[in-house]
Image (cartoon, rainbow, N blue to C red):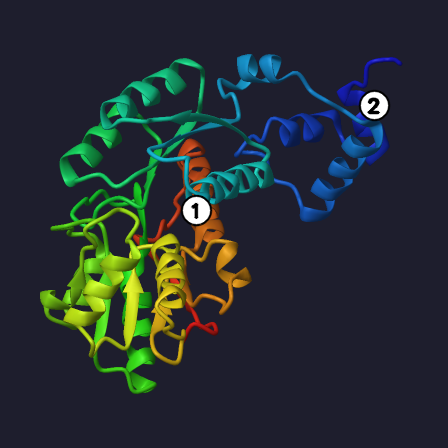
């Protein structure tokens, strides 16, 4: 099969070669109507055109690759965030290179590695303090940090998930159902993260339960309920803790939600499938990824983009309440 040229595409689309070149190379100075873009896109698909990424990068100085660095890829929510970045990048005709930073000190090294591999821009996902977030922002540009600590400030480079609004909504909903003695279960003792901060702004620290084991035992649960028989509802750091609470309730003949209302966090796939289905809080992963990718591309093109500082999480009501 003969190689498809820009001339072939231009003839198929009924436009000039210059317009085709501008479209393929995504030149920001080139202006064309949506109809023209669609004609060229249809011609590209019909002729099965695959331009050389290497040749294009030499011409434009751009690789059309976004780097993605994550502190955690072991959890379902972290993997879903990564996939959301892949989808958002693909919509803009960008590829994604991934680097896993298993330790904090590897984050900057991975950013450097992705830079050396030709990434045009980088998204970093992790819970960093203000100093470390500033280091990341100084190490590479353009960069967007997802989900970092509330103390971090760098306008146009940080996008957080707003947990607090959804936690507040969950608490108000539980209270509307008559729950007065609401507890929060977490493994992060002394934590300053959003879930904890919002909870203790509504309740006393004594309502926070730190189980003695990473996976609470039946005896741990018996001891807790003996000490706090008034507890009628419990929020959790994540869905796995919440699902374990449902297991423990079953083990001691407590009924969910009749004897205890249970709320998780992360809205993993299992939340819908368990019995009873688990009320949870969902992060706006897709929306955040789209904003991050569009912001980076706008920076590359020297265009303005109003990157939001945070996006609200959503409280999802299910049968565990």
Quarter holding residue 59? top right
The residue located at (79%, 38%) in the rendering is 42
| Coordinates of residue 172 in the picture (x, y in percent) | 29, 79
Quarter of the image that includes the C terminus: bottom left
Is residue 247 something that shows in the picture? yes
Apparent side of residue 35 relative to residue 125 in the rendered image (left or right): right
Residue 73's image quarter?
top left
Does the CB distance between marks 2 and 1 fall below 8 Å?
Answer: no
Location of mark 2 (residue): 8
Say which residue appears at 34% left-offset and 55% top-offset.
241
Q: Is residue 139 above or below residue 167?
A: above
* Residue 162 vs residue 42, the one in the foreground: 162
Q: Earlier in the sequence, mark 2 or mark 1?
A: 2
Instruction: Please give the name of the residue rendered at 85% of the width and 31% of the height, measured from the top-left corner.
Output: 12
Find residue 289 and report its horizontal and vertical position in percent. 45, 45
| Nearer to us: label 2 or label 1 | 1
Residue 77 circle label: 1
Q: Is residue 312 visible?
A: no
The crowd level at tag 1 (other Cα within 10 Å; few <14, some 14-19, many 20+) is some
How far apart are labels 2 and 1 at the CA level?
45 Å
Q: Nearer the viewer, residue 57 or 256?
A: 256
Q: Give the side of residue 70 with respect to residue 153, left or right.
A: right
* Quarter containing the N terminus: top right
Sort mark 2 into few (<14), some (14-19) or many (20+) by Cα contacts within 10 Å.
Answer: some
Q: Residue 273 in the image: x percent, y percent? A: 55, 61
């Amino acid at each position: 099969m003969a190689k498809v040229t820009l001339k072939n595409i231009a003839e198929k689309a009924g436009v000039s070669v210059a317009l085709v070149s501008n479209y393929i190379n995504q030149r920001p100075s080139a202006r064309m109507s949506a109809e023209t873009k669609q004609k060229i896109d249809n011609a590209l698909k019909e002729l099965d055109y695959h331009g050389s990424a290497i040749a294009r990068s030499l011409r434009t100085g751009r690789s059309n690759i976004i780097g993605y660095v994550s502190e955690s890829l072991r959890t379902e929510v972290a993997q879903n965030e990564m996939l959301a970045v892949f989808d958002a990048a693909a919509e803009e005709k960008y590829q994604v290179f991934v680097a896993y930073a298993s330790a904090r000190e590897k984050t900057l090294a991975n950013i450097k590695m992705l830079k050396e591999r030709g990434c045009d821009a980088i998204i970093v996902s992790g819970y960093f303090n203000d100093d470390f977030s500033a280091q990341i922002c100084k190490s590479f540009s353009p960069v967007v940090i997802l989900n970092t600590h509330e103390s971090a400030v760098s306008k146009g480079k940080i996008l957080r998930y707003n947990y607090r609004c959804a936690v507040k909504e969950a608490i108000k909903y539980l209270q509307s159902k008559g729950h007065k003695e609401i507890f929060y279960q977490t493994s992060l003792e002394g934590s300053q993260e959003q879930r904890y901060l919002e909870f203790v702004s509504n309740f006393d620290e004594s309502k926070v339960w730190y189980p003695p084991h990473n996976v609470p035992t039946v005896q741990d649960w018996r001891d807790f309920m003996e000490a706090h028989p008034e507890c009628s509802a419990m929020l959790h750091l994540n869905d796995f803790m919440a699902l374990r609470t449902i297991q423990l309730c079953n083990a001691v003949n407590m009924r969910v939600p009749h004897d205890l209302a249970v709320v998780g966090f992360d809205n993993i796939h299992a939340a819908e499938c368990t019995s009873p289905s688990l009320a949870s809080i969902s992060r706006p992963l897709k929306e955040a990824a789209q904003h991050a990718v569009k912001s980076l591309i706008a920076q590359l093109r020297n265009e303005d983009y109003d990157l939001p500082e945070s996006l609200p999480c959503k409280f999802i009501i299910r049968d565990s309440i």
